[in-house]
Amino acid sequence: MSASLESRQDLLLDNLESFLEEGQDTGHMRPGYEGFARVLRRVAETEHQSCLLLTSREKPGELVPLEGSRAPVREPVTLSELRAMLVMPGPSGELLEAIDGLRQRSLIERGQHSGSFTLQPVVLEYVTTRLVAEVSGEIAQGGLARLIQHGLSQAHTRDYVRRTQERLLLAPVLACLLSVLLGPAQVDELLRSLLDQLRQRALEAQGYGPANLVALLHMLRGNLRGLDLSHLSLRGVSLQGIELQDTTLAGSLIQEAVFTEAFDAINGLAISSNGEYWAASSRRGEVRVWEAGGQTLHRIWQAHTERVWSLAFSPDGRMLASGSWDGLVKLWEVTSGMLVWSGRHTGNINSVAFAPDGSRLASASYDSTVKLWDVVAGRLHQTLTGHTERVHRVTWSPDGRLLAWR
């Protein structure tokens, strides 16, 4: 101890669990090793310049009260968070029993916050190494089980956690694949073939598979341009800042995902009358439509050159109208995303609304007018004037005989 007080000493004590009682879950020292426990306590309580690194599958109970708030370096999870991450959550009692079994074996430890826990460092290192080996070996053989069960990178974790997941899981898996196969082109082809396999399964049976493969493809390519990601369950995928030009997402189920900042700036929202389709528009003129009650991304397209301030579904839900600050009102077919017709104002368009019978469409603009359009023919039916200022909103009466705007 005197040497460690006078100058810095770095000491490593490996396999500390060999000094602990077997068959116990309290981390007590074996009989005859109490003096060693007192030495550890003194090292922990005394101010010095040295470093004592302990590795153990169990935590000595004598050291638990001495842990500081800065001691944990892993990200703990709660039971509810862990359950939400499971692909096929079983009964809550089984999960509790499994956690309790790990705790009794001192393979997990309590986190900083109440009800949270994390793996022991040695266990975490072992599990990480094992997971990388099994996932990379499975992918090389065309397997999918581990990819489906485990999310290698989670979009909604903190940034530093996601970067650590990429460094410790995704990067080693990709490195293993590149060493086994001939090169990037072969790895790319293999990953895309696995996506095709997953596409043949029901969305609920795909688990984390598609998201893991997309993350590996992005790390390999640096972008996701031109990929077919249709009819895939993209759970926990991060698409923030990723190039997706010409990428197909039709029929995909996107959940717990993070998109680019551009999509976060939503200007217009609409839901079809039967609730089947949901639509959102962005400040950059993009329109996205979801189906299945807003759960499955149906289509994305660049609808306008400026922000789209207003969206409206036709009463039968087959058409979607958009009004933009580029001065254009457009009618789209929902299922195909095809443009049916477009019309023009001389100012920004702030509001669009279908008549109750779906035969006419009204659009309101900064040019102080409201225009009525024949939905079927796409022709301008009438221009209503009378305002000297911008027109911000327009709406129909329930019987379609009256129109109000402000």
Image (cartoon, rainbow, N blue to C red):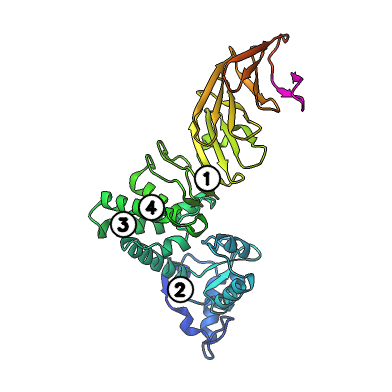
| Residue 12 image position (x, y, % from top left) | 41, 72
Q: Which amino acid does label 2 sit on?
A: Thr
Q: Check the image and report above or below for 151 versus 339.
A: below
Q: Quarter of the image for the C terminus: give it.
A: top right
Residue 254 vertical position relative to residue 315 in the rendered view, above or below: below
Is residue 162 in view from this perspective?
yes
* Structural crowding at the residue carrying mark 2, measured as other residues with C-alpha within 10 Å and reported as few (<14), some (14–19) or many (≥20): some
Give, as a three-letter code, the residue at label 3.
Ala
* Discs 3/1, front: 1
Q: Which of marks 3 and 1 is nearer the N terminus?
A: 3
- Residue 196 is marked as 4
Q: How far apart are marks 3 and 1 (CA)?
A: 25 Å
Is 320 in front, or is 90? Answer: 320
Residue placed at 53% from the left, 88% from the top? 30
Q: Any mark on residue 55, and which?
A: 2
Dot in front, 2 or 3: 3
Q: Which badge, 2 or 1, is on the more N-terminal residue? A: 2
Magenta residues (range): 392-406
The residue at which mark 3 appears reads as 175
Q: Name the residue under label 1.
A: 258
Q: Is residue 187 left or right of residue 323?
A: left
